[in-house]
Image: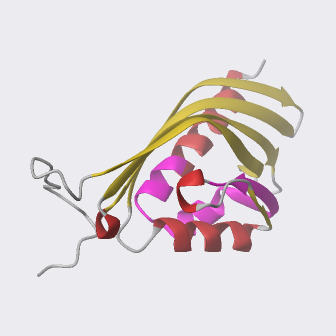
Amino acid sequence: MDLVVLEEIRRLKYRYLRAVDLKQWDEVADTFTVDATADYGTRATGEDGKHFEGRDAIVEFLTKSLGNGIITVHHAGQPEIEVDGDTATGRWSFTDKVIVPDHKVIIEGAAFYEDTYRREADGAWRMTHIGYVRTYESMQSWANDPGFRLLANRWAVPA
């Protein structure tokens, strides 16, 4: 197995997660092929099992659902990557936390990403599919918790 290719695919996934959390939408777009598909969703918003066709549709969904002052933290690990020439598959364990200050809620969950990848003409690996099914998801409100304080928010509008 080509260890360089495995590292390139790991770095692709980590770049995607970082760019989502930092709201770097152009960089997120560059992690996908033009014809990529995605299966995302969360029961917290009633959007369990949404399917998207094409890079633009995926990035539009992420921008609308995770932008607007929403704080996210994604961690992925334990990759199981299989490479077959210029295509590959990957399975990743992941956990995430979504903080929605406007609604005073925190959503946490875990799942296993099931991804496919393709090496493109420019030599870069990109995702052709990303998706997951939750193993769990929880939501809690801090609206009535006087002990909870959000001390920092990179996307907060200054008062």
Q: Is residue 125 magenta?
A: no
Q: Foreground: 108 or 129?
A: 108
The outermost residue toward the front is: 144
Q: Horizontal and vertical percent for residue 30?
A: 64, 62
The residue that appears at 38% across and 64% down in the rendered structure is: 70
The residue that appears at 56% across and 51% down in the rendered structure is: 16
Q: Foreground: 19 or 112?
A: 112
Q: Horizontal and vertical percent for residue 146?
A: 10, 52
Q: Foreground: 151 or 14?
A: 151
The residue that appears at 23% across and 71% down in the rendered structure is: 156
The residue that appears at 25% across and 64% down in the rendered structure is: 154
Q: Is 147 drawn above or below residue 76 in the view shown?
A: below
Where's the C terminus, which quadrant?
bottom left
Q: Horizontal and vertical percent for residue 108?
A: 44, 42
Left or right, 48 with reference to 63: right
Left or right, 14 with reference to 4: left
Q: Is residue 39 magenta?
A: yes
Q: Horizontal and vertical percent for residue 83?
A: 82, 29
Where does the magenta region start and end?
17-41
Left or right, 77 with reference to 142: right
Left or right, 19 with reference to 129: left
The quarter of the displayed image where residue 68 is located: bottom left
Q: Is 157 drawn above or below residue 107 in the view shown?
A: below
> Is residue 17 at all visible to an observer of this figure?
yes
